[in-house]
């Protein structure tokens, strides 16, 4: 073997070893970050493990609809004043008007036995319940057994009066008004009456995914019902007598520049600077607001930060702040008119948050235009607000490679403790490990001369 050949082998060995050391360090670092997240990450196993919040004026209710559903109410001092995890999932939560310390919510239980309308388990039991926060007494207001588990939930209910409640029914792609005393359905709107089943999500498994309903009590649309069809990327307005008012529809099928599988729109009437709609643009990773101008919807405000991943609720509070739920960011936060996070509490896969003293869906909040709010969006160069440079860099790397919707889907099915930083660390570690294995195989094949042709150098033209 010539001296030149030996030198090349030495250099090659050193290069390989440097790569091995770098990849091993990356795998070990990722494993350490994941392990740390699994031990001190968020948990919903018991009330004692729920993190406290910073003091805040009023009570804040937070629901979780992940693999361990919970409902938690924080008092003004930040302590937990109510907690329950007896249901499989919790969704909408509202204060009950005229009832101090009483809230109403929707929840779903997975039933693994036969029910009155389900002979092929698993089924779903959907409920509207009330709880007195001072006594802990729970009352079932209305319930229904449904025939399926996947997309078999009620994500929202809007009380009209003492006995009647509007319900967003994902199971049947409908909105219905039920008298909870008589259990008679007094009005029903079926999305299939207005939209083709070839659009939206998979039919009939999870076609429209109606996740929000709101009764409009004043202004030009008084008496209309606002409905969020997630899988059609649209918020529509329905007149109970004449049907859908197409001139007021916000969004369009697959028009992702406007909205992409949105959640929980809130209507702001003319008396508070509207008509306007605050909505969580979930798959675009932002909260936004649309103002009605000359018969059209115009985006008037949007907000996101580097950590924002999958927002599913946003309420404009009377003090001008916006209360935001970021499900895969594992947090509930209050954002000031200047765009700064003024208050935040960690939460495992939160669905909705409500400041109880502000009324149903924070009824006193004004529009972004009325308040003069300026938009703020995430800057790729910003440091994560937690100051976690390593985790922030890993998260940024993964999010730059993996499409936002795919990233959300993986997070949704990953272990509950694996939040944004831990998922990023795990992804980078797996990629580093696979790269290492691939390089080792390639090096062995190269050294064995398998599939490798030595170059032949000739002078002059090739024959």
Image: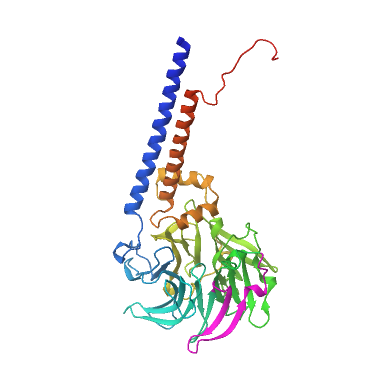
> At 51% from the left edge and 74% from the top edge, which residue is drawn?
147
> At 50% from the left edge and 67% from the top edge, which residue is drawn?
150
Q: Position of residue 174 (x, y in %)?
A: 58, 75
Looking at the rendered image, the quarter that the C terminus falls into is: top right
Q: Is residue 418 visible?
A: yes
Q: Position of residue 192 (x, y in %)?
A: 65, 73
Between 295 and 39, the one lying in front of the other is: 39
The extreme left residue here reads: 48
Q: What scheme was used to colour the molecule?
A: rainbow
Q: Position of residue 396 (x, y in %)?
A: 48, 45
Q: Position of residue 224 (x, y in %)?
A: 62, 78
In this rendering, the count of numbered labels is 0
Between 106 and 123, the one lying in front of the other is: 123
In the displayed structure image, the side of residue 221 where residue 181 appears, left or right: left
> At 57% from the left edge and 77% from the top edge, which residue is drawn?
175
The extreme bottom residue here reads: 182
Between 362 and 7, the one lying in front of the other is: 7
Q: Is residue 384 visible?
A: no
Looking at the rendered image, the quarter that the N terminus falls into is: top left
> At 70% from the left edge and 71% from the top edge, which residue is drawn?
247
Residue interval drawn in magenta: 169-198
Between 362 and 436, the one lying in front of the other is: 436
Residue 196 on the magenta segment: yes
In the displayed structure image, the side of residue 57 where residue 2 appears, left or right: right
């Amino acid at each position: 073997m010539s001296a030149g050949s030996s030198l090349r082998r030495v250099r090659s060995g050193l290069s390989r070893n440097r790569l091995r050391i770098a990849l091993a360090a990356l795998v070990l670092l990722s494993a350490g970050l994941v392990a740390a997240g699994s031990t001190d990450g968020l948990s919903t196993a018991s009330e004692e493990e729920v993190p406290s919040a910073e003091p805040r004026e009023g009570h804040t209710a937070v629901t979780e609809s992940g693999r361990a559903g919970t409902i938690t109410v924080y008092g003004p001092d930040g302590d937990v004043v109510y907690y329950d995890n007896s249901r499989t999932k919790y969704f909408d939560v509202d204060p009950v008007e005229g009832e101090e310390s009483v809230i109403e919510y929707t929840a779903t239980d997975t039933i693994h036995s036969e029910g009155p309308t389900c002979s092929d388990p698993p089924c779903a039991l959907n409920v509207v319940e009330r709880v007195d926060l001072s006594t802990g007494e729970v009352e079932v207001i209305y319930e229904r057994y449904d025939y399926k588990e996947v997309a078999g939930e009620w994500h929202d209910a809007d009380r009209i009066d003492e006995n009647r409640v509007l319900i967003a029914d994902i199971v049947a792609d409908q909105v219905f008004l039920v008298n909870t005393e008589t259990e008679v359905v007094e009005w029903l709107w079926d999305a299939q009456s207005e939209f083709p089943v070839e659009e939206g999500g998979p039919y009939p498994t999870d076609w429209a995914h109606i996740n929000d309903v709101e009764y409009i009590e004043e202004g030009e649309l008084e008496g209309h019902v606002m409905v969020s069809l997630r899988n059609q990327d649209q918020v529509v307005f329905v007149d109970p007598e004449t049907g859908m008012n197409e001139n007021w529809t916000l969004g369009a099928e697959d028009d992702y520049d406007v909205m992409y599988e949105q959640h929980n729109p809130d209507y702001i009437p003319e008396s508070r600077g509207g008509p306007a709609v605050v909505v969580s643009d979930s798959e675009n990773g932002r909260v936004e607001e649309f103002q009605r101008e000359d018969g059209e919807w115009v985006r008037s405000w949007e907000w996101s930060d580097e950590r924002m991943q999958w927002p599913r609720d946003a309420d404009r509070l009377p003090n001008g702040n916006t209360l935001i739920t970021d499900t895969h960011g594992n947090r509930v936060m209050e954002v000031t008119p200047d765009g700064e996070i003024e208050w935040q509490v960690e939460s495992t896969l939160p669905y909705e948050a409500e400041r109880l003293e502000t009324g149903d869906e924070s009824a006193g909040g004004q529009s972004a235009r009325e308040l003069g709010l300026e938009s703020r969006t995430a800057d790729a160069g910003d440091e994560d607000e937690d100051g976690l440079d390593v985790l922030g860099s890993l998260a940024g790397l993964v999010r730059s490679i993996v499409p936002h919707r795919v990233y959300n889907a993986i997070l949704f099915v990953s272990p509950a403790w694996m939040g944004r930083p831990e998922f990023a660390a795990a992804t980078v570690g797996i990629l580093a490990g696979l790269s290492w294995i691939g390089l080792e195989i390639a090096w062995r094949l190269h050294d064995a001369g398998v599939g490798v042709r030595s170059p032949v150098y000739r002078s002059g033209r090739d024959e």
